[in-house]
Image (cartoon, rainbow, N blue to C red):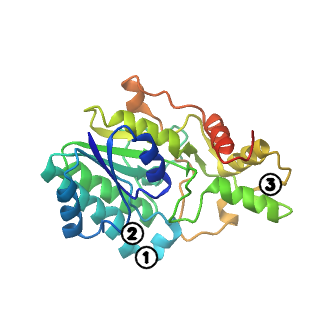
Amino acid sequence: MKVLVTGANGQLGTDLCQSLQHFQLIPLTHSDIEITNMNSVKQVFGKYKPDTIINTAAYVRVDDCETEQDKAFQVNALGARNAAVAAQELGAKLIHISTDYVFGGEAEPRTIPYTEFDTPVPISIYGKSKLAGEDFVRHLCQKHFIIRSSGLFGAAGASGKGGNFVETILKLAQERHQLKVVNNQIFSPTYSKDLATKITQLITTEYYGIFHITNRGSCSWYEFAKEILKQAGLKTPIIPITSDQYLQKAKRPSFSVLDNYHLRLLGLDDMRPWQEALKDYMISKGYIK
């Protein structure tokens, strides 16, 4: 199988390229393809004629999306449309990466994890642009997998964000006498290596549709930070705060835990607990033995 990956040097893209080694891999970065330009996408896809396309290209700066709405929709919505149109013309499978931030805007507070059959209600420009991208993929490409995940951390770091939450916490813990971390946003931290492994498994199937893929369990950012420092053996105190005390341009869901329901229905949900995944990450980075 010939597999083309956009955003191949990003956090998830890097792990995907490792996981896809036994396929005929075509890793592309932004210098190779302009996802917002239909002609560029058709030309590049047409040149390589892949059997499967994994589009990880996205504008992921959640706060900046609020002030750069045009860019958010150009990349996250129109970029997804371009990939979907080109994939459909080739008869290729398309894997589109989405987010838990398509949820969170319901009138009633949520406490039950979202399944793939819940109706998305985004509350930020980022979430709205990602949902628009999902809609394009669903309607324009027959052989599609829409993968929603959350709280990604991986060895390469998110190039659009300049790292990941784990690295940020470890760095700040060395620089400050105490940390303040939000405790009222609940999600499922996910190791991009585990996500890449599951995507690699899925693309060999014809189980098209929407999939939630996260590591097992959930926590707040505060609880995540506590576990990071615990595993690293650092004693820096962490103070829990509310999102109202940590002002950000974009509103975040207070609860965006995803249930890997579709995987479970297929007997494919073997995702490990996020604490185990974090330990594996910490070992791979040399923070613990």
Mark 1 surroundings within 10 Å by alpha-carbon count, few (fewer than 14), some (14 through 19), many (20 or more) = some
Image coords of residue 16 (percent x, y): 43, 46
Residue 144 shown left or right of residue 62 in the figure: left
Image coords of residue 152 (percent x, y): 54, 50
Whether residues under marks 2 and 1 lie with C-beta atoms below 8 angstroms apart, the answer is: yes
Q: Nearer the viewer, residue 211 or 172?
A: 172
| Residue at (86% x, 62% y) in the render | 177
| Residue at (64% x, 34% y) in the render | 276
Work out how far the residue at label 2 is from the one at label 1, CA to CA, in angstroms.
6 Å
Q: Amino acid at mark 1?
A: Glu
Q: Quadrant of residue 197?
A: top left
| Residue at (43% x, 76% y) in the render | 68
Q: Amino acid at mark 2?
A: Ala
Residue 225 shown left or right of residue 150 in the figure: right
**Which residue is denoted by mark 1 in the rendering?**
68
Residue 47 shown left or right of residue 245 in the figure: left
Image coords of residue 114 (percent x, y): 46, 40
Residue 238, which numbered label? 3
Residue 148 lies, with reference to residue 112, above or below; the image says below
Work out how far the residue at label 3 is from the one at label 2, CA to CA, in angstroms.
33 Å
Q: Quadrant of residue 240?
A: bottom right
Work out how far the residue at label 3 is from the one at label 1, CA to CA, in angstroms.
32 Å
**Which residue is denoted by mark 2 in the rendering?**
72
Lower position in the chain sequence, tag 3 or tag 2: 2
Q: Amino acid at mark 3?
A: Ile
Image quadrant occupied by the N terminus: top left
Whether residues under marks 3 and 2 lie with C-beta atoms below 8 angstroms apart, the answer is: no
Lower position in the chain sequence, tag 3 or tag 1: 1
